[in-house]
Image (tube, rainbow, N blue to C red):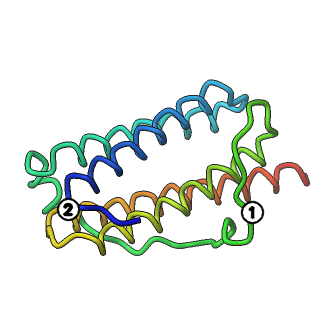
């Protein structure tokens, strides 16, 4: 995927984040466990923050400059799953698989987008989003692992 300008890249990224906001908000409405509902609501809110960050990089310069990168563990659970489309009424383990794959794709996307711009501020925002989406992926992989463990007990 190639873009003609940093504005095109940002518009594309903002659209992906808006889709993620809606995705997690819809999952929160369907979740039957309070812990899952809370997780999905929080993810939706975090994706909203990503929209705001991408929408006004210059206005968020202080926040961007202060961001501290940390090593995020990758459980790699989603690496061994086939990507599939979300369908309403899916069982929770399947929903978590779909969400994990979406976050995995987002990490790859933002890594790619960071490499497509010479704008240092935009590049840093994309690397921040790589880390934020990696955190979501880890959270979902942990939930999935815990969910399966609960089923065995």
The N terminus lies in quadrant:
bottom left
| 60 sits left or right of 54 in the view | left
Q: Which mark is residue 122?
A: 2
Q: Quadrant of residue 14?
A: top left
Kindly state the secondary structure of the residue where label 2 is placed. helix
At horizontal 71% and vertical 32% (from top left) the residue drawn is 33
Q: CA distance from mark 2 to mark 1?
A: 31 Å
Viewer-proximal residue, 39 or 112? 112
| 109 sits left or right of 68 in the view | right
In this view, 44 is above or below 94: above
Mark 1 Cα shell of 10 Å, populated few (<14), some (14-19), many (≥20)? few
At horizontal 24% and vertical 61% (from top left) the residue drawn is 4
Kindly state the secondary structure of the residue where label 1 is placed. loop
Pick whichever of labels 2 and 1 is earlier in the sequence.
1
**Contact, mark 2 vs mark 1 (Cβ under 8 Å):** no
Residue denoted by label 1: 82
Relative image position of residue 69 (x, y in whole percent): 30, 70
Relative image position of residue 111 (x, y in whole percent): 38, 70
Q: Quadrant of residue 47?
A: top left
At horizontal 47% and vertical 68% (from top left) the residue drawn is 108
Mark 2 Cα shell of 10 Å, populated few (<14), some (14-19), many (≥20)? many
Relative image position of residue 77 (x, y in whole percent): 69, 68
Relative image position of residue 149 (x, y in whole percent): 82, 56
In this view, 45 is above or below 131: above
């Amino acid at each position: 995927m190639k873009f003609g300008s940093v504005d095109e890249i940002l518009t594309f990224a903002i659209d992906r984040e808006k889709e993620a906001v809606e995705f997690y908000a819809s999952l929160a409405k369907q979740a039957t466990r309070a812990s899952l509902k809370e997780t999905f609501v929080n993810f939706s809110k975090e994706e909203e923050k990503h929209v705001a960050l991408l929408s006004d990089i210059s206005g968020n310069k202080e926040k961007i400059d202060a961001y501290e990168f940390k090593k995020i563990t990758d459980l790699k659970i989603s690496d061994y799953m086939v990507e599939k489309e979300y369908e309403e009424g899916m069982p929770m383990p399947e929903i978590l698989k779909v969400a994990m794959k979406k976050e995995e794709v987002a990490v790859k996307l933002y890594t790619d987008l960071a490499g497509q711009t010479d704008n240092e501020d935009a590049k840093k925002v994309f690397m921040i989003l790589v880390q934020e989406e990696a955190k979501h992926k880890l959270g979902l992989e942990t939930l999935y692992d815990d969910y399966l463990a609960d089923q065995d007990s």
